[in-house]
Image: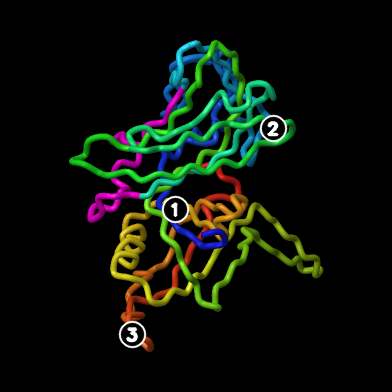
Amino acid sequence: MPGDFTLGCLLGQYDRAQSFDVASVGAPYTTNVGCWEFSAGSGDFIAGTDVHSSGQSLRWNATSSAPNRELFRYDYRGSNDAYGRWFPDVTTHAMRADYWARETTAAMSGTAYQDFGDIPGDVHRYIPYVGVGLAAIRAEGVWVFSGGVGGPLIMFKHAGGGATIQFVVEDMLTQVDPITLYPEYEFLEHSRLLAARHRTQGGVLHTYQWTRHFAWQVPLRFLSNSYADLINWWWVNGYPLVFTLDTSDQATNYTAKIVNETQPIGSKIKPYVYGLDGWAGVLELESLTQGDLVF
């Protein structure tokens, strides 16, 4: 629902390639960047313009007369990536991808599109023309785990028709098993500043400030067994997460980790209303970065 808090397990390697904020290379670029596999067309990297929260984005050029021609993809099933992050006791997984993109020519709006590979009934997300800035796009689907075969891919394709397209994409956040949270009123959001202070003998205060990060305390009650198990499993494994403060606003997405020193969800609470028994705890989260989406 719009306005909900959600928490999901972040997929993708820690190589900055999910935001295409990697070491710049010469254009055209037609092989791979990190685990992004390029198949048709050519791309280059744009620094300083057409970006969302990182230093550069990917601009892709392609011509195709064949419908649904694949341009490039990211495979989240690799053993060197996030394959182990799917909760083992669940066979049906919700998928969500947030990214920022735009078609650079109005006449070509909707010619390039994105979908999830290996997800039945997946709906295409067409990339719109935007004159200035990038459009926030959200893709959702459901993947059924079947004996370790198949799995979600992020795929960008050309709708065909012999058209030449050029589009820009940046900051891909793909998460699995996002759950909706209902924090208590004691929820806290604050920033932490990494700094050192020293006062001289003469009374002069010197401050050395490096950076800041975000932190949240999320008190939770009436969690189901499955939600409690999932949160504790993310904590035990130290998985990176996507924490969303408002599902109607993609500007409230943060990459984060659970930093509790002890098990975050561990208290069984007595129900006051029939059917509302469950688990309780205080979830402590800290952002992976200063607030950008590069990881």
Secondary structure at numbered mark 1: strand
Residue 278 visible at all: yes
Q: CA distance from mark 3 to mark 1?
A: 32 Å
Q: Nearer the viewer, residue 187 or 128?
A: 128
- Three-letter amino acid code of the residue under disc 2: Val
Residue 158 appears left or right of 135:
left
User: Number of marks in the image?
Assistant: 3
Residue at 70% over, 56% down? 208
Find disc 2 in the rendering and name its residue.
Answer: 130
Position of residue 70 relative to residue 185, above or below, is: above
Q: CA distance from mark 3 to mark 2?
A: 51 Å
Q: Where residue 241 is drawn, which disc sits there?
A: 1
The x, y position of residue 195, in whole percent, is: 65, 59
Lower sequence index among marks 1 and 2: 2
Asked whether residue 61 is drawn in magenta, I would say no
Residue 57 appears left or right of 268:
right
The x, y position of residue 137, in whole percent, is: 56, 41
User: What is the quadrant of residue 130 in the picture?
Assistant: top right
The x, y position of residue 50, in whole percent, is: 68, 31
**Residues at circles 3 and 1 in contact by the CB criterion of under 8 Å:** no
Find disc 3 in the rendering and name its residue.
Answer: 274
